[in-house]
Amino acid sequence: MADHLSPLAWTRHLTDIDNFPGYLLLGGSAVRVVVTEDADTHVELVDELGHLERSHELVGIRVDAGSCGKLHQPQSILAAIARRVDLFDVFTHVARRIWRDLGYPSTEVTIAKVAERHGLLHNELRTEFRAESRRFIGDLPGLSRDFRTAIHTVLLEVIDHDHRGRAVAQRVESYLLGTLGAKDLFELGIQRKVSKETATPAMRNLLALLCAARPQGTLLHIDLRWATDELLLTEGPAWRATKTQRIAIYQWVRELIDGVDRFTSTLICVEFGPQFPNASFSGRGWGLYDALRLRLEDGVRPVGGPNPSAPFVPLEVR
């Protein structure tokens, strides 16, 4: 169709014309909503996003009906993202960056090993690390105050003892999964459990932490074809979304778009099926929620053909 692009043409435009890899490296973020017309287009989109991740060393995370039981709940999507991240590895990378900033480049992380390598006293090194850690975390955009406290707590445990750091990192994961108890939350310095209202800020915290470990950025692909065209799904259960669930999903995607400037170095690709650009209130598409439709439809049919830089791009294998 004249207003459709292939996934290959779209992702090439993202890199060659829009320069998204450079934009992410500078801390920018964006939400792009796409429609895949059929299963073949979906497979090509996944392949091209994977190529984009590998070519530019992005952290790639994909959430779909097979990995998330309740795609209409943002807290469940957050949990699915958290399950795909090795948080102890992330904290280890951040600790190495801080040691490097202090002038102690090494593959080692714990104070004992860094002190042995450089012939320094443990207490002096810990004092240096603590001060640099606060400066480093304070310079990171997109973090809430309590999550900054949690990061600092985990980092100090990581440099003291690997095994204890791993246990505290698991608490952060439990917080993101929504399973951490009130006592452990308090010890981490986090004020509120993950809920529908706090899931998106918590997601911003997690993605900002990933950026601290790997500054190239994150590519988050959320496959929501289940909401509009469940028969296209080739993996996971084929659930039929209710009207209430679709509206909840559209409200959340609108929230992502409106708050994208508060994310850090993240490209969020939200994928729907071909029924999504249906303006009828009795249909399954964006006609159910005008606030989302109005943010997207202006970019659908510009004069002269498709606009690969638009916030909404229909995709189809040619």
Image (cartoon, rainbow, N blue to C red):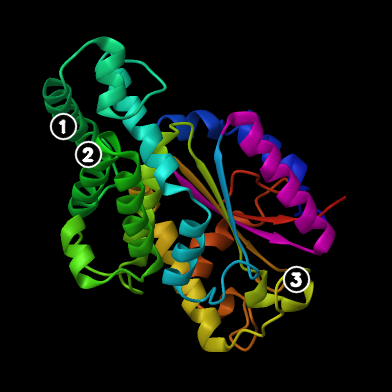
Q: Which residue is mark 1?
A: 130
Picture layout, residue 101 above or below residue 40 = above
Q: Position of residue 55 (x, y in %)?
A: 65, 30
Q: Residue drawn 31% across and 72% down?
A: 197
- Circle 1 Cα neighbour tier, 10 Å, few/some/many (<14 / 14–19 / ≥20): some
Q: Position of residue 296 (x, y in %)?
A: 54, 61
79 or 219: which is nearer to us?
79
Range of residues picked out in magenta: 29-57
* Type of amino acid under label 1: Arg
- Residue 164 visible here: yes
Q: Nearer the viewer, mark 3 or mark 1?
A: 1
Q: Which residue is mark 3?
A: 233
Q: Which residue is mark 2?
A: 156
Mark 1 or 2, nearer chain start: 1
Quadrant location, the N terminus: bottom right
158 or 214: which is nearer to us?
158
Look at the numbered discs 3 and 1 and tell me whether their residues touch, using CB distance below 8 Å. Answer: no
* Type of amino acid under label 2: Leu
Picture layout, residue 157 above or below residue 93 = below
Q: Residue drawn 63% across and 82% down?
A: 280
Q: Position of residue 273 (x, y in %)?
A: 70, 68
Q: CA distance from mark 3 to mark 1?
A: 48 Å
Q: Residue drawn 72% across and 76% down?
A: 229
Q: Residue drawn 31% across and 23% down?
A: 113
